[in-house]
Amino acid sequence: MGGSAPGRRFRRARRGACGVSRRDFLAKVALVAALLALAGCGWFAERWEWNQKLTVEVLVDGEIASGSAVSYVRWQEADALDNYSTAYRGEATVVDLGERGVLFALIGEATKYVAGYTLHEELGERRSDYETLYPKVAGFRGVREVAREAYPLLVTFTDIADPTTVKRVDPDDLAATFGPGVALKRITLEITDEAVTEGEVEAVLGWLRWSRERFLAAGGGENPLRAPDNSPVGYETIGRTKFIRR
């Protein structure tokens, strides 16, 4: 007799008009969905990264005092929700003014934008066109002067060992803080292959190594880094990550 052998049954997968089984079709749909999800998370996104050196030059009685620090910056092309993933790390620029004190140019969110702000015209791009501007920034080499409106926050301390003595410094009037004969000459930015700066700020500000409990205790239970200003609360709170970000 014809037919299949006794006790054995063969089950054939149902196939559509294109010869693809339902199981294969669902597997492919799941794979495409997973790839789209990964793309939305930025797994396949293009990245642009560079190291940038910020140098601050100060005139002290006719002589130049300067300090530099190298930071790392990363930008990533927009995800499915048109959000840009970004990152930066480094530390503040330290300028030793001798008997006049120490000036700090802080890092922060603006650190990610200063290169684009400084170089966009020279590179023929608008600052907002991240996906055409930042690939050019990453490949740029050279030193350029930072525009006044892109300056970082400048601060100093009346007592370098006491974080509660922090105060802002007006870049247009350093003499008001450090005395006659002190003036900001310029701030420059360089896209560089040099390594990210480490350890220079902690060597000057020992309290950066304090535990969180000790740090808050210095401010009466709050962040002690409160620089007086003209705001309604009377001060600006400055996080420790403005000095060091790893």
Image: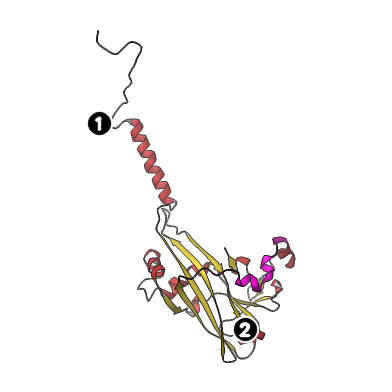
Name the dominant secondary structure of the magenta segment.
Answer: helix
Closer to us: 198 or 215: 198
**Residue 239 seen in render:** no
Point out the stretch of residues depicted in magenta.
196-213
Q: Is residue 244 above or below residue 187?
A: above
Three-letter residue code for mark 1: Ala
Secondary element at image label 1: loop
Residue 97 is situated, as x and y percent measured from the top left of the image, at 62, 83
The N terminus lies in which quarter of the figure? Answer: top left
Secondary element at image label 2: loop
The answer to which quarter of the image holds residue 131 is bottom left
Q: Is residue 16 above or below residue 43?
A: above
Residue 203 belongs to the span the image colors magenta: yes
Q: In the rendered image, which residue does mark 2 sit on?
A: 97
Residue 134 belongs to the span the image colors magenta: no
Q: Can you tell which of label 1 and label 2 is closer to the viewer?
A: 2
Residue 18 is situated, as x and y percent measured from the top left of the image, at 25, 33
Q: In the rendered image, which residue does mark 1 sit on?
A: 17
Q: Residue at x 41, y 43 (%)?
A: 34
Closer to us: 239 or 232: 239
Identify the mark nearer the N-term, 1 or 2: 1
**Applied colour scheme:** secondary structure
